[in-house]
Image: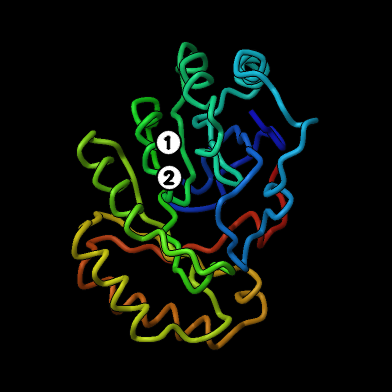
Amino acid sequence: MNVKEIFFSYQGEGPYIGSPTLFIRFGGCNLNCYYCDTKYAKSVTKQNNIEPQHLANKILKYLKKYKPEFISLTGGEPLLQKQLPDFLKEIVKYKNFKIYLETNASLVRQFHDVINFIDVCAINLKIPEDDINRKNVITNTQKIVNLCKKNNKEFFIKITICGRKLYNDYTLKRLQKFLVKTKPKSLVLQPETSSLKKKSKTLFFNITKIFKLTKKYVPIIYIIPQLHRIIYKIR
């Protein structure tokens, strides 16, 4: 497994913002979002490799010291780790916490392999035009939402809203189609931090557009910026 860093902090995104959390950041990502704020986690290097049992032993020490409410699997993209199920089998033995998966929701088979270990899934819906390589993973995201529902897993949809350019009608129609098919109970609209700091008018218009669209289909909508990016680091 390729692990970039392990640290204790407080959740800075989404509806569980402020929760004491142990973060495990894995290396490697299959997408290339232009606004990525953890570019260093995209690379996979040999010195970051660790066996599942060894990682579980390290995590146990953190659990005893910090007693977090959540263990967050983040990245990069955690589901790229082939031995992730093996690690989770070990760590859930010490279950006085919840497993929180942060995923770009593009890897359906890999998600299926770990779903039984996950308590909360933050499903990051990626708008294709925000990926430098123009990858469209919305169909796979829809499948992962359906898997969460089928297995009674807690999840929420998160969309990073950008201020680079105005979203067009085609983008909004794709989003509308996704919401009609998945019917999520809650949605987080997350302003992209660099645009937020620049007080981008385009960002404001995009948030307004997406909010007006999504409120027709989703009962609970949050607009939550990245707290940890605004106040730097809370470690």
State the image coordinates of residue 97 (x, y, percent, origin top left): 46, 24
Q: Quadrant of the C terminus?
A: top right
On the picture, is 130 further left or further right than 146? Answer: right
Picture quarter containing residue 207?
Answer: bottom left
Three-letter amino acid code of the residue under disc 1: Gln
State the image coordinates of residue 213 (x, y, percent, origin top left): 28, 77
Q: Is the residue marked by circle 1 packed among few (<14), some (14-19), or many (20+) residues within 10 Å?
A: some
The residue drawn where x is 43% and y is 65% is 189
The residue drawn where x is 28% and y is 60% is 220
Q: Is residue 128 above or below residue 16?
A: below
Three-letter amino acid code of the residue under disc 2: Leu
Q: Nearer the viewer, residue 217 or 108?
A: 108
State the image coordinates of residue 57 (x, y, percent, origin top left): 64, 13
User: Which residue in the structure is indicated by mark 2?
Assistant: 107
Mark 2 and mark 1 residues within 8 Å of each other at the beta carbon: yes
Q: Nearer the viewer, residue 88 or 93?
A: 88
User: Which residue in the structure is indicated by mark 1?
Assistant: 110
The residue drawn where x is 77% and y is 31% is 46
Label 2: which secondary element: loop
Q: Is the residue marked by circle 2 packed among few (<14), some (14-19), or many (20+) residues within 10 Å?
A: some
Q: Nearer the viewer, residue 15 or 125?
A: 125
